Image (cartoon, rainbow, N blue to C red):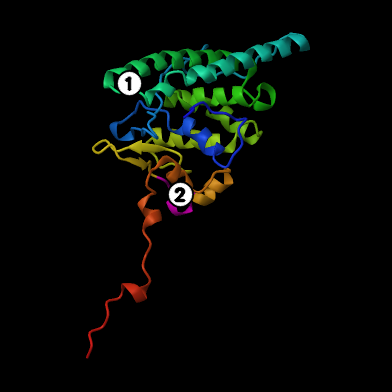
């Protein structure tokens, strides 16, 4: 199975194929109980912290104004687009091999190699964003915008939170897909040990390795929230990833007429 996200393909399950790469290819946990799952044979993405180009304490600055001519500006954007698209490929370079790893040592080696790539991608994204601002899909194209999102999605919590204002602004400006924002929001909440809102994050139980959804707030209304973000029902998502639905959604109370014990014959 190909694990690179393709925004050019259109089908009923394209959303899920996109989400799989963003939701289920992260691995290094903050706490043991926060381990994400190995979904359909693919381990979850390793998180590598890296500093911002100017300061670790501050978010990347908005795009700097320059005296470049319109032609030069177009050339700079095109160069950044090409570089970001290449970064989207490198983001998946070793992750695509994780499902084929047969030993723990092989898995660790793949994560180490991918971690080095992630660190470089995160540092380079900081530099690009400092120049151009957040990567808008209307300017750089879907694939470059997706690459920027994945690089941030695969970062650690402090970096994700520093990028949060830009990502929220991109959502409001229709420069970020709603389902991507749901993934980002839920990931941050999970790393903060808080319930997720949209049910996008899956973990593996430390003791058994069983895959389950990270805790979901107001779980009975999760499908309404998912619908607002253009996402399919949680049951479809769970089926695709072969993960059981939360207990609250599977417990169906029997009618009183069936649950009552029959009266003894007099």
- From this viewpoint, which residue is outermost toward the front? 1
Image location (x, y in percent) of residue 81: 63, 17
Q: Is residue 91 magenta?
A: no
Image location (x, y in percent) of residue 232: 53, 46
Q: Which residues are magenta?
A: 216-222
Report the quarter where the C terminus lies.
bottom left
Provide the residue designation for mark 2: 235
Q: Which mark is residue 107?
A: 1
**Going 27% across and 77% down the picture, which residue do you hit?**
261
**Going 47% across and 34% down the picture, which residue do you hit?**
20
Depth check, front residue: 52 or 47: 47
Answer yes or no: do the residues labelled 1 and 2 have beta carbons within 8 Å?
A: no
- Please determine whether, in this image, residue 185 is positioned above or below residue 257: above
Task: State how far apart marks 1 and 2 are (Cα).
Answer: 31 Å
Q: Is residue 220 magenta?
A: yes
Q: Is residue 213 left or right of residue 233?
A: left
Circle 2 crowding by C-alpha within 10 Å: few under 14, some 14–19, many from 20: some
**Going 36% across and 24% down the picture, which residue do you hit?**
100
């Amino acid at each position: 199975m190909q694990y690179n996200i393709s925004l050019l393909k259109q089908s009923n399950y394209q959303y899920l194929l996109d989400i799989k790469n963003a939701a289920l290819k992260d691995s290094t946990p903050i706490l043991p109980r926060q381990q994400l799952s190995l979904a359909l044979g693919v381990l979850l993405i390793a998180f590598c912290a890296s500093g911002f180009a100017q300061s670790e304490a501050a978010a990347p600055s908005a795009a700097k104004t320059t005296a470049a001519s319109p032609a030069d500006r177009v050339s700079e954007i095109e160069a950044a687009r090409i570089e970001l698209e290449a970064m989207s490929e490198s983001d998946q370079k070793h992750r695509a091999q994780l499902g084929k790893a047969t030993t723990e040592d092989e898995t660790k080696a793949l994560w180490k190699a991918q971690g080095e790539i992630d660190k470089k991608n995160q540092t380079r994204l900081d530099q690009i964003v400092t120049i151009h601002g957040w990567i808008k899909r209307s300017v750089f194209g879907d694939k470059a915008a997706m690459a920027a999102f994945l690089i941030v999605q695969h970062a650690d919590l402090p970096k994700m939170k520093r990028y949060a204002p830009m990502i929220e602004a991109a959502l409001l400006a229709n420069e970020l897909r709603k389902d991507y924002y749901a993934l980002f929001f839920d990931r941050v909440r999970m790393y903060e040990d808080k319930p997720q809102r949209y049910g996008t994050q899956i973990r593996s139980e430390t003791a058994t390795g069983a895959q389950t959804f990270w805790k979901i707030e107001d779980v009975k209304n999760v499908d309404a929230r998912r619908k607002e973000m253009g996402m399919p029902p949680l049951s479809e998502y769970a089926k695709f990833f072969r993960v059981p639905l939360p207990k609250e959604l599977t417990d169906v109370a029997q009618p009183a007429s069936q649950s009552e014990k029959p009266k003894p014959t007099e």
